[in-house]
Amino acid sequence: MIPVRELMTTEVITFSVETPVEEAAACLAERHITGAPVVSEDGFVVGIVSETDLFGKRGTTVGDVMSTNVVSITEETGIEEAARLLVGHRIRRLPILREGRLTGLISRSDVLEFFATRVWTCTACGHAEHGLEAPDRCWSCSGQSFRLDWAHPRH
């Protein structure tokens, strides 16, 4: 299992509940991101705001339009579980918490980049395949030991 702490973004753009909607929208647009966590003064995640919240709901502050039903994970959560949550909840980002406070973020783009740039290589025969977790067996030689490598362009 590869924990998300190994690929999470640690410099996360966040908003407070008092942030004006216009300011949040400009920030997301400028940085080409689709949403961000909303945190209290002491770093606890109290919501998440997306671009559709900003232009699809009525309100003057982020607190008025944010979603409060936040799906989050810890730094030790495996990337495969993070991917399942992203897909299963149809969300674009997962805040990563330590003792309830924001420590990072992982997005669908982060998971896709991991999948595209890493391969599991069989230590017995060298066969490589993409995946979020190591395969049970190598389809080439039936080996059961794998290492995580950077993908070559031909993979």
Image: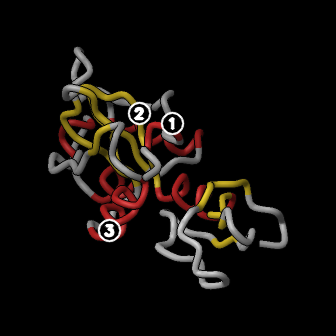
Which amino acid lies under the numbered mark 2 shown in the image of this protein? Gly
Labels 2 and 1 touching (C-beta < 8 A): yes
Helix, strand or loop at mark 1: loop
Which amino acid lies under the numbered mark 1 shown in the image of this protein? Thr
- In the rendered image of this protein, does residue 22 appear above or below residue 128? above
The C terminus sits in image quarter: bottom right
Which amino acid lies under the numbered mark 3 shown in the image of this protein? Arg
Quadrant of the rendered image containing residue 14: top left
Q: Residues within 10 Å of mark 3 (few under 14, many from 20)?
A: few
**What's the distance in space between the residues labelled 3 and 2, CA to CA?**
19 Å
Report which residue position mark 2 lands on.
Answer: 104
Nearest the eye: 36 or 117: 117
Question: Is 54 on the left-hand or right-hand side of 26?
Answer: left
Nearest the eye: 27 or 34: 34
Quadrant of the rendered image containing residue 3: top left
Residue at 34% in and 66% down: 84
Q: Residues within 10 Å of mark 1 (few under 14, many from 20)?
A: some
Report which residue position mark 3 lands on.
Answer: 90
- Earlier in the chain: of badge 2 and badge 1, it is 1
Helix, strand or loop at mark 2: strand
Nearest the eye: 36 or 77: 77
Residue at 18% in and 34% down: 46
Helix, strand or loop at mark 3: loop
Report which residue position mark 1 lands on.
Answer: 9
- Earlier in the chain: of badge 3 and badge 2, it is 3
